[in-house]
Amino acid sequence: MKKLLSVLLGMALLCCAFAAAAEATELPYLETEDQDVYLSSTVLTETSYPKICITPYSEYNLFERDKDEPMYVVLPCPEGMRCESFGLSKANFLRLDASTACEYYYEAVDRWSYEDFLLKVENEEYILMDGSEGIAAYINPERAAARALFGLDEIQKGAKLYVEIHMQNFSKKEDAEKVKLLTDAIQAEITRVKENMTIAKADNLFWTNGTFKGIKLFSSSVTGKVFTMDLPQVAFNLSEEISGQAFVTNVSGNSFAAYVVPERGKYVSVKGSIDSYSYVNYDRDESEITKVTLSDGNEWQIYVANENDGKPYSIYAARVLNEGKDDKPIQLTLQFGVDNQKPWENVEAFTKDLDTFAKCVKTEAAQ
């Protein structure tokens, strides 16, 4: 059912999709764009998420510690669908056709039994596969859903790939039609996964590492604008030298996550969000906030969330992007985190690193 590959995962995933970009003078952006079928959702461009690439292991074990091998499930994206969001262990897809709208969700988990997976099935007639052949599957017409579970013993004993299909515009259909539609959909997906799923080891930790110049997020909050942030090459001002270029590990709507990992166990994490809410200044006393004007010309507010012996290792920073509805400013919030044994000496040292990222941020008119 699956082939065990020992390849450079970036090459395996990007192949044709990024062949042209490799010859270009600079890397492409990882981009999202608007769509008009699902309310308040954005989708990634096809070249920004060319294949499903997920692992049952966490960022903590792969990047922040040298514990688990960077093994990934690799699959073609479902045909005719666009990725709405992705992370290290999950990816969500939407069909952008109002008449056949549906959602496909994939998640890799490190431990799950077929028995536990099937426990919640009340009507045994809806069980399509019981796990005896390495796959369990059932439908749930009341929830307009079909679900399947695949073994990933090549990665770890007990690890699984979970697949869920959720159909839209389902409530007015007859019961028999619901059963047929869900059964046909999940059976077709089971066949597709069996024929195409491979297991790959990532020599570069994650497929986005070195693949993109930066991110471009379409945001309904920043009206008519696209938020752009380049991924800088950074030498952080920490107690132990950590340097490298950030690579994206998560994109979902108006938020993203990234890591700088020169070697496993040495890291800086970066999370960003665009919202009228910011953790920096929500219900917080002004004495807790440090205000600085950086070389981008904007005022940033800084809040130290955690420190070790007075030295910060988890810090939030925010600046206003534009004025939003009801006089609530839309803010960009960045959260930086490092090992608590490798902190910044003080806020001033952190501010130098923040300035490097701040210079990479801009908003521009949507195309």
Image (spheres, helix red, strand yellow):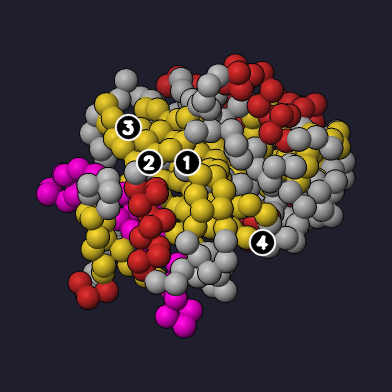
Residue 226: numbered disc: 3
> Could you tell me the amino acid type at mark 3?
Val
Q: Label 4 belongs to which residue?
A: 265
Residue 360: numbered disc: 2
Q: How far apart are the two marked residues, 3 and 1, measured between alpha carbons? A: 16 Å
Q: How far apart are the two marked residues, 4 and 1, measured between alpha carbons? A: 21 Å
Disc 3 is placed on an element classified as strand
Q: How far apart are the two marked residues, 4 and 3, measured between alpha carbons? A: 34 Å
Q: Earlier in the sequence, mark 4 or mark 3?
A: 3
Contact flag, marks 2 and 1 (Cβ < 8 Å)? yes
x and y, in percent, of residue 217 in the image: 39, 35
Q: Earlier in the sequence, mark 3 or mark 1?
A: 3
Q: How far apart are the two marked residues, 2 and 1, measured between alpha carbons? A: 7 Å
Q: Nearer the viewer, residue 21 or 133?
A: 21
Residue 285 picture quarter: bottom left
196 relative to 53, above or below: above
Q: Label 1 belongs to which residue?
A: 231
At label 1, counting other C-alpha atoms closer than 10 Å, the crowd grade (few under 14, some 14-19, many 20 or more) is many
> Could you tell me the amino acid type at mark 1?
Leu
